[in-house]
Amino acid sequence: MAATTPLLRPPLRVNGQVVTLRGTTVTSLDDEAAMRLRDDGVDLLLCDATEATRGVWEVASRVGFAVIGRVAAGTPPALLHDLAREPSALGWLLAGHAPDLTPPHGTLLGTPADHPAASSAHFIAAPAGATIPAGKPVLLLGDGEAAGPVIGRVG
């Protein structure tokens, strides 16, 4: 289970500068595509955490992205621990109603707003207008405004 300590406090700061992560969803990534995304201002990738997408984390680490992996029911914990070793690994998002998990050390755990573990997650991933537990940072999915402090957007 994720710690309830506020490890992620909006506004998010990198090197003292306030940052709102700008993200996109990917299923694969090579260096050329990564550079195009960087040129477009993207700094966060949302990707399924599977053996087939391991290369996304590797390219992201080289090019300088943060990655949040979507974790489905049945995802092997050993895979998450391997992916968490990549410098790009920021955290995990429980997909749908995947069972709760303790995130690998140094990574964050997010849930959809209606997930049973939402109250103990580090952040909530939700579309505009979703009801967010009080004080939870939000990874906004799509356009619009969030009901909580936004740490990033994935369009």
Image (cartoon, rainbow, N blue to C red):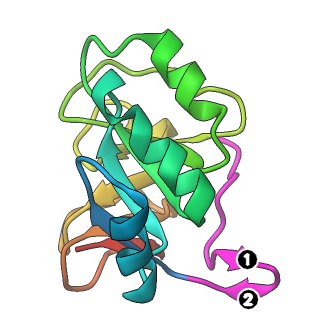
Identify residue for label 2. Answer: 17
Q: Which residue is rendered at x = 35% and y = 32% of the image?
A: 49
Do residues under tags 2 and 1 come within 8 Å of each other at their CB atoms? yes
Side (left or right) of 1 relative to 48: right
SS at circle 2: strand
Up the image or down, 120 lies above or below 104; here it is below
Instruction: Compare residues 98 and 63 and report the one nearer the observer.
Output: 63
Identify residue for label 1. Answer: 14
Side (left or right) of 49 relative to 131: right
User: What amino acid is labelled 1 in the image?
Assistant: Val
Extreme residue in the front direction: 32
Instruction: Compare residues 109 and 119 and report the one nearer the observer.
Output: 109
Q: Position of residue 125 (x, y in %)?
A: 32, 56
Q: Quadrant of residue 24?
A: bottom left
> Which quadrant: the C terminus?
bottom left
Distance, label 2 to label 1, CA atoms, is 5 Å
Q: Is residue 73 visible?
A: yes
Q: Which residue is rendered at x = 31% and y = 46% of the image?
A: 47
Q: Position of residue 131 (x, y in %)?
A: 24, 62
Disc 2 crowd, CA 10 A, few/some/many (<14, 14-19, 20+): few
SS at circle 1: strand
Q: Which residue is rendered at x = 37% and y = 68% of the image?
A: 32
Q: Which residues are magenta?
A: 1-19
